[in-house]
């Protein structure tokens, strides 16, 4: 039985690079506080994450905290995949 991947950080960083055209300094960098992500970039990021990871992100249940950093996005996506 294949093991479920629980580390998507490299793929998340690739999506972020595509969306914001900038590299994230560290996986725990607060993307909202640093201004690397604004509201428009967040919408684009969510759409790209859905596409890349084949998940559906429910906008009604969306919590901003899940998108503050690469680490928090990783945890969020792992949770959706389980």
Image: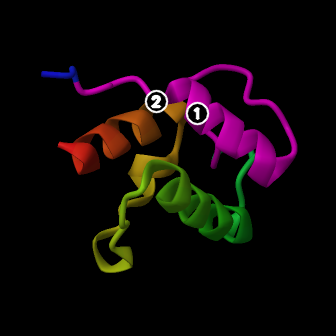
Q: For residue 13: magenta?
A: yes
The residue positioned 45% from the left and 49% from the top of the image is 53
The residue positioned 57% from the left and 23% from the top of the image is 27
Q: Quadrant of the N terminus?
A: top left
Residue 11 is marked as 1
59 and 48: which is toward the camera? 48
- Residue situated furthest left in the rendering: 1
Q: Is residue 27 left or right of residue 14?
A: left
Residue 58, image x, y percentages? 33, 73
**Secondary structure type for disc 2:** loop
Pointers 1 and 2 in contact (CB under 8 A)?
yes
Residue 66, image x, y percentages? 40, 49
Residue 56, image x, y percentages? 36, 67
Q: Quadrant of residue 28?
A: top right
Q: For residue 9: magenta?
A: yes
Q: Which residues are magenta?
A: 4-32
How much space separates mark 1 and mark 2, taking CA atoms? Answer: 5 Å
The residue positioned 42% from the left and 56% from the top of the image is 54
**Secondary structure type for disc 1:** helix
Q: Is residue 28 visible?
A: no
In the rendered image, the vertical position of residue 3 relative to residue 22, given as above or below: above
Q: Quadrant of the C terminus?
A: top left
In the rendered image, the vertical position of residue 77 relative to residue 61, given as above or below: above
44 and 37: which is toward the camera? 44
Residue 31, image x, y percentages? 64, 42
How many residues crowd mark 2 within 10 Å: few (<14), some (14–19), many (20+)?
some
Residue 8 is marked as 2
Q: Is residue 72 left or right of residue 12?
A: left
The residue positioned 61% from the left and 70% from the top of the image is 43
16 and 62: which is toward the camera? 16
- Residue situated furthest front in the rendering: 1
How many residues crowd mark 1 within 10 Å: few (<14), some (14–19), many (20+)?
some
């Amino acid at each position: 039985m294949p093991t479920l991947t629980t580390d998507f950080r490299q793929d998340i960083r690739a999506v972020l690079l595509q969306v914001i055209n900038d590299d994230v300094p560290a996986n725990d960098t607060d993307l909202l506080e640093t201004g690397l992500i604004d509201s428009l970039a967040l919408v684009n990021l969510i759409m790209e994450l859905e596409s890349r990871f084949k998940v559906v992100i429910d906008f009604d249940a969306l919590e901003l905290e899940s998108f503050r950093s690469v680490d928090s996005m990783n945890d969020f996506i792992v949770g959706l995949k389980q």
